[in-house]
Amino acid sequence: MASRKESMSTPTAPMASTSSGATLDSPVKQIQIEGLVVLKMIKHYQEEGQGTEVVQGVLLGLVVEDRLEITNCFPFPQHTEDDADFDEVQYQMEMMRSLRHVNIDHLHVGWYQSTYYGSFVSRALLDSQFSYQHAIEESVVLIYDPIKTAQGSLSLKAYRLTPKLMEICKEKDFSAEGLKKAMIGFEHMFEEVPIVIKNSHLINVLMWELEEKSTVADKHELLNLSSSNHLEKSLQLLMDRVDDMSQDIVKYNTYSRNLSKQQQQKHQYTQRRQQENAQRQTRGEPPLPEEDISKMFKPPQPPPRMDTLLIAGQINNYCQNVKEFTSQNLGKLFLAEALQGHNS
C-alpha cells in the first residue's frame, strides 16, 4: 500500500473531549519533546516515506503552564483511496484508549508530518491545523525534514496558526478585502514555537556509553566544498512556485479588469436610463420601470486570495532554505581560502 501524498494529507482532528478541556491563559511558548518521540518520527519516515510522499502521525502529551510537553506519538497507518472503510477518527480513538489502559499519556496535543525540501505550506496543512487548533487550543504541528536531517543536523520545527489567521478561517472570508481588513500577510499566517528535546538521565548515560563504544566513522564531511543537489532542487521548487504566483497574479489582474469594465457598463447604463427618463418626462410619458441592476450585471467571481498567500509563504520558506544553505557554503569557502593562504 502506498503512503498518502501531501496533496492528500488531511488528517482529521479529534473531538475536543480528547484533551484536558482547559482554556490556556497564555499561548504555548515552548515545546518540550521526549527524545523517544523524535526517534519514532524518524523511524516512521525511514520505514514508510519515499521521495515526495509524506508520513503523518498523532502527538500525545500534556500542557504544563505555557509549556507543551510531547511524551508520545503514533503514526497514521498506510492506506489508499480504495480503503473507503477506514475511519481515521475511530483509529485515533482506539489507539488513545489502548494507551490509557497501559497508563501512558493519551491526551491529543497535535500531529506531525514529514516534508520534502521544505514543501509543507499548503491548503491541506492549513485546513488540518485549523481543525486541530479549533478543537484543541494548544495543538501544534511538527514538521520533520528528513533531507536536512540526513545532512547531519536534525531539522524539526513546530508551528501554530496565528490568532489573526484563526479568526479569518472561522469567518471563511478569504477575499482580498477581508484579508486586507484583517491585515493578514504570508508572514502572519504561521508562528514558530521553540522546541527543546529532553531525555532522562538514564538515556543520557546510555547515549554517552554508546558514543564511546561506537566504531562508525563520522560520514559527514563538514568542510567538503562540493555542493550537493540540495541547492539545485530548492531552486527548481522555488521557480515552480514563482510560476504559480505569476499565474495567480494574472488571474487577479484579469478579474480586476473585468470588474472595472463591468462598473463602466453599469455607469453607462444608468446614465442612458436617466437620459431616456428625462426625454419621456418632457413628452409627458411615464418614466421607465425600475430594474435591478445587480441582476443584469452579475459581478465576476473573485479568485481566492488565500492560495496566493500560501504560495507566498512557501516561496519565503524556499528562500530561507536557499539562504541558509548558501551561507554555510560561503563560510566554508572563506575558511578554505584562509587555510590555503596560511599554508602557502
Image: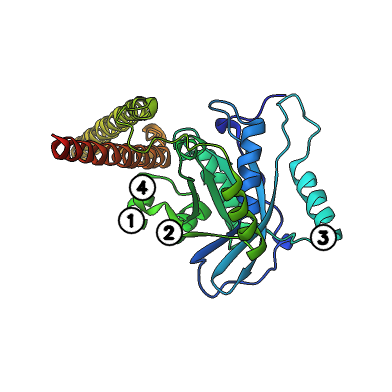
Quarter occupied by residue 216: top right
**Residue 292 seen in render:** no
Badge 3 vs badge 2, beta-carbon distance below 8 Å: no
Amino acid type of the residue tagged 4 in the rendering: Phe
Horizontally, is 282 left or right of 286 in the view?
Answer: left
State how many labels appear: 4
Q: Residue 23: where, in percent of width, then height?
A: 61, 72
In the picture, the disc for residue 332 is none
Query: How far apart are the two marked residues, 1 and 3, measured between alpha carbons?
Result: 43 Å
Marks 1/2: CA distance? 8 Å
Q: Position of residue 253 (x, y in %)?
A: 27, 31
The residue at which mark 1 appears reads as 183
**Residue found 46% across the figure and 40% down from its top:** 152
The first of marks 3 and 2 along the sequence is 3
Instruction: Name the residue carrying label 3.
Output: 100
Q: Give the CA distance from mark 3 to mark 4.
A: 39 Å
State the separation of the CA atoms marked 2 and 4: 12 Å
Q: Amino acid at mark 2?
A: Lys
The label on residue 186 is 4
Q: Are the residues tagged 1 and 3 within 8 Å (C-beta)?
A: no
Q: Quadrant of the N terminus?
A: top right
- Label 2: which residue? 164
Q: Residue at x 35, y 45 (%)?
A: 176
Q: Amino acid at mark 3?
A: Arg
